[in-house]
């Protein structure tokens, strides 16, 4: 099985799309950053460093300081695929992030998004 091209896509290219999606729905960049930090363990400085470095999504997730232990509680459909049923662990991490950003854009409360 070949790698999906999203794995080698620069996170710095995808990040602004997450922010735009949130901002179109009245949410903020700070909330997007909070979600990314919750899921990956990146601090604000760590996230900015990864964006400046231009690393790909695979590297961004592989170098994440601490993937949140409650990420398995993220359930639902993204692009017609149930995130809990994604077999590839890397693709599942990407779908987790996509799902959290979708929930933010749909107006869900941060306490519910972060599944603390």
Image: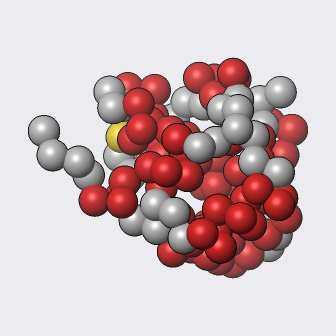
Nearer to the camera, 51 or 78: 51
Q: Quadrant of the N terminus?
A: top left
Q: Residue at x 36, y 60 (%)?
A: 8
* Residue 104 visible, this angle: yes
Residue 40 to residue 87: above or below? below
Image-based side of 14 in relation to 46, left or right: left
Q: Residue at x 55, y 30 (%)?
A: 75
Residue 11 to residue 99: above or below? below
* Residue 35 visible, this angle: no
Q: Quadrant of the C terminus?
A: top right
Nearer to the camera, 90 or 92: 90
Image-based side of 18 in relation to 57, left or right: right
Image-based side of 48 in relation to 76, left or right: right
Nearer to the camera, 17 or 25: 17
Residue 60 to residue 22: above or below? above
Q: Position of residue 53 (x, y in %)?
A: 60, 69
Q: How many marks?
A: 0
Report the coloring of the rendering. Answer: secondary structure
Q: Position of residue 112 (x, y in %)?
A: 80, 36
Q: Position of residue 47 (x, y in %)?
A: 73, 59
Q: Residue at x 15, y 46 (%)?
A: 2
Q: Residue at x 77, y 30 (%)?
A: 115
Q: Position of residue 11 (x, y in %)?
A: 53, 64
Q: Quadrant of residue 24?
A: bottom right
Q: Quadrant of residue 65?
A: top right
């Amino acid at each position: 099985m070949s790698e999906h091209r999203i794995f080698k896509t620069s996170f710095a290219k995808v990040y602004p799309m997450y922010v735009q999606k949130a901002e179109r729905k009245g949410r903020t960049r700070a909330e997007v950053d909070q979600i990314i930090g919750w899921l990956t363990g990146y601090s604000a400085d760590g996230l900015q460093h990864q964006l400046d470095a231009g690393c790909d999504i695979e590297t961004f997730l592989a170098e994440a300081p601490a993937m949140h232990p409650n990420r398995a509680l993220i359930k639902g459909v993204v692009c017609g695929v149930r995130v809990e049923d994604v077999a590839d662990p890397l693709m599942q991490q990407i779908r987790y992030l996509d799902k959290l950003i979708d929930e933010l854009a749909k107006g869900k409360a941060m306490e519910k998004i972060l599944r603390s």
